[in-house]
Structures are given as C-alpha cells and as structure tokens.
Image: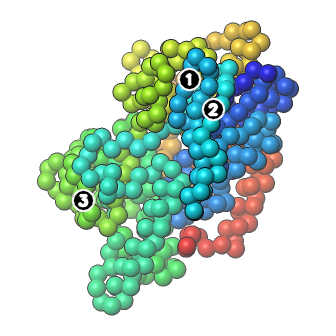
Amino acid sequence: MHKIVVVGGGAGGLELATRLGDTLGAKGIARVTLVDRCPTHLWKPLLHEVAAGSLDREVHQLEFAAQAHWHHFEFVQGEFVSLDRASKTIGLGGVFDAEDGQQVLPSRALPYDTLVLALGSQTHFFGVSGAKEHTIPLDTPEQAERLRRRLLRTCMTKSACNQSGKGATVNVAIIGGGATGVELSAELRRMEKVFSQYGLRAPEQTHGINITLLEAGPRLLPALSERVAHATAVLLQDMAITVLVADPVIDVRPDGVLTRSGKHVAADITIWAAGIKAPDVLMSLDGIEVNKMNQVCVNNMLQSLADADIFALGDCASCAWTSALFVPPRAQAANQQASFLAKALKARLGGRSIKPFRYIDRGSLVSLGSASAVGSLMGGVIGGSILIEGLIARVMYAALYQKHLAAVAGVRRMLARLLIQGLRRTTSPRVKLH
C-alpha cells in the first residue's frame, strides 16, 4: 500500500492522521503512520492552564497508541532527526526511559511514499542574554509541569516566610505579550485565590503574586487587532497585572530582568513567551528550502518547493496567504490545513485534482480566566471584525477545545470526556497540589 507518514502529533498532525486513517487507512487504500517523540497529545492552547495548576495534564492528554487503534493508523514513537529523499526514508532517534535513562527503542529508519511535516514550533529566544538559562518556556507539557511545580514551591516557601513575619510576595515576570503571555498572566491571577484556599498563599493579602507582563512591541497581542489589544489591556489592568510595552528585555538574570530603558523588574519566576520558530532539525533536511524561522517553504498545495512528495502544515510551514502576508502560526490555521490535506492526499491517490489551499481568518479569542475572554469573531468571513468579550467569548473559547476533541476522538467520545471531566471537578481540588 501507499505509505503516508505524518511527523508531529500536534493539533494539525493528529487531526490529519485521524482523518486519513478513517478514510484511506480503514479502506486499505494507504498505510498511514503518525510519528511523534512523545507517547501522548495535549492541545497546546491548554498549556497555560497546566502551568497555573488549574488543569490536570493527566486527565486531558490523549494516548497516540489508543488513537491509532481507534482510527486505523499506526503510531511510531521517536524523534525525527533526518531525511533521505533518495531512499524516501526518515531517520528516528532512540527512545529512552524518562526515569532510568534506559533505551527502549533504538535509532531506526522509516520508509514513506508521501511525507507530511507537522512538527509545530519551539521557543525562540532571539539571542537575549540569560534567557535560555534563567527562564521557563511554555512550549511543551513538560515545560508547563516544570513551571507549575516551580510556582507551587515558591508560593509555599513565601507563605512560610509570611508566617514568620517576613514579606511573602511572589514576583512573576512574563516576557512576551502575545496570546500565551496574556492568557498565562490572567490564569495566574485567577488561581491566586485558589492557592490561598489550600494554604499556598497568605489569605489576608489582596495580591500576594505580583505579575508583570513585558512586551517589546508598542502594544499587547501584536498579531490581533488594536481593538482586541486595547480591550485586553484594560481587563489586565483591572486584574492588577502590570503591563510594560515598547521596552524590550535585553538581559535575564536569576533575580529578574533588565529592559532596554534600564528598568529592572524583580522576579522569583521568569517565563519566556516572546516568540517561536520551527524546530532546528528542519534546517538540516536534505535539500528542503526553509525561511529564517526554519519553516518549510510550501506552495499553495502545501507541497515543499523542493519535493512534490513532501508536504508541511501548521507552525512549521511557510505558506503565502496574500501577496504580502503568510498564514499565521495559529491552531485554526493548522486545523484548516489538516482538513485540506486530508482531501488533497485522498484526491492525489485517486488521480484527481482539487483547488489550492486558501486560509480563512475566522477571528481569534484570548482567554482571560474562567469566566472571561476577549477577541474578534469571523474577521475574514464578513470582511471586518466583531469585538466580543465576557462570558460569551469564554464559552466560545471553551468550544474550540471541544471542537478539536470532536475532530480527533469523535463526537461521542468528546461528549463522554466532557461529562467525566465535569464529574471529576466535584471530587477534586481546583488546583493540582502535587
């Protein structure tokens, strides 16, 4: 059978493998394989909630092996390390046990007829001094867990100091005023009240966690409209979150950050949410053209410019949107591209052609806590944008996750998971305490 290999189990890659498995794999037309270095999938927009402790990663993650069994594709665990276009194989690194370091799987080669790269993105430090050493990024579930444990430990330590009569303020600096930084700052402020309920914060303090959000550009949310950015800034101000814009961070130190204007922001915890780039491995691929952000350059069929049998989607693909703009690295773009490729690859095997990919901006939403969100709705569909905020925006934001679950697990499993998670909230603490 024709071998289709999808590398990367993020939102776009997992949705594509699931769609192809349900069609081509189930009918025996193609052998579909998903490759990822991790055994589980977690929707990336949830990472800020994992980091704040308001969402349990173990409950919301999806096992690739189980997904493969249910949807007629194969899962192979391993890190993508090389490409041989002549032999049509990809190289996978060895898999090692996280606890004892023992090798579980050796390095190996995997053949393909059609290859789809959906590797997502990684942190871009932009060469800022001390950023890599003294900040915690928020790109993976492991990093989110590291941040959550660091936050709990710091809060417990400062609370103990408070009982002995010393100051107990926890200073958190978040570098990057994009969606990740904004959502994390709001979630931390919301969870502060929950921390005090479980003795992790001094209950008599109004705000025992000082949160500073730093953005190098002139405003927050540079990828969204000015109306959304202004509404977000007002809401963050109401939450007593300090916002500093137009003052880039030039040095990160163990006790805080230094900006270009000379301002020092004290920080017990510094979080990096300032930018992304495609994984470095893409720069070393055999003859594959990439841009300065390591993204694979593709045409309007999402094919790489160097090889018609290699496709790319999501954050790791550089795809033209208009004559002056490229498709932005958003979950909705990965979703649209996965849907397109599911149809395009099926048509390709059948000897048919389809219309080129066209990105439609359906607006953006930013979460600002359990009962609020802000964003623009249907911007590219109606030719303008409608500003929405409050509970309605929050409900729509939550619906995006359920839509993703429905796409990868089916409507019945999505509804079952939603019911189970609702019941679990009645018997579990509102914050993960260990």
SS for callout 1: strand
For mark 3, what is the residue? Answer: 253
Task: Of the two numbered discs 1 and 2 on the same chain, state the one appearing first in sequence.
Answer: 1
Task: Of the two numbered discs 2 and 3 on the same chain, state the one appearing first in sequence.
Answer: 2
- Residue type marked 3: Arg
Outermost residue, right side: 27
SS for callout 3: strand
Residue 345, quarter of the rendered image: top right
Dots 1 and 2: beta carbons under 8 Å? yes
Mark 1 residue crowding within 10 angstroms, few (<14) / some (14–19) / many (20+)? some
Q: Position of residue 58 (x, y in %)?
A: 64, 60
Q: What whole-number distance in Å separates the C-alpha atoms at marks 1 and 3? A: 42 Å
Seen from the viewer's position, the closer of residues 251 and 87 is: 87
Q: How is the image coloured?
A: rainbow
Give the answer, above or below, for where 84 lies relative to 52: above
Seen from the viewer's position, the closer of residues 243 and 250 is: 250
Task: Of the two numbered discs 1 and 3 on the same chain, state the one appearing first in sequence.
Answer: 1
Is residue 220 shown to the viewer in this render?
Answer: no
Q: Which mark is residue 84?
A: 1
Q: What whole-number distance in Å separates the C-alpha atoms at marks 2 and 3? A: 42 Å
Is residue 259 shown to the viewer in this render?
Answer: yes
- Is residue 221 found left or right of 358 in the rendered image? left
Q: Position of residue 374 (x, y in %)?
A: 48, 47
- Residue type marked 1: Asp
- Residue type marked 2: Ala
Give me the residue at 61% from left, 19% from top.
Answer: 87
Q: Position of residue 208 (x, y in %)?
A: 36, 74
Give me the residue at 72% from left, 24% from top.
Answer: 3
- Is residue 221 found left or right of 4 in the rendered image? left
For mark 2, what is the residue? Answer: 109
Seen from the viewer's position, the closer of residues 31 and 210 is: 31
Q: Which mark is residue 247?
A: none
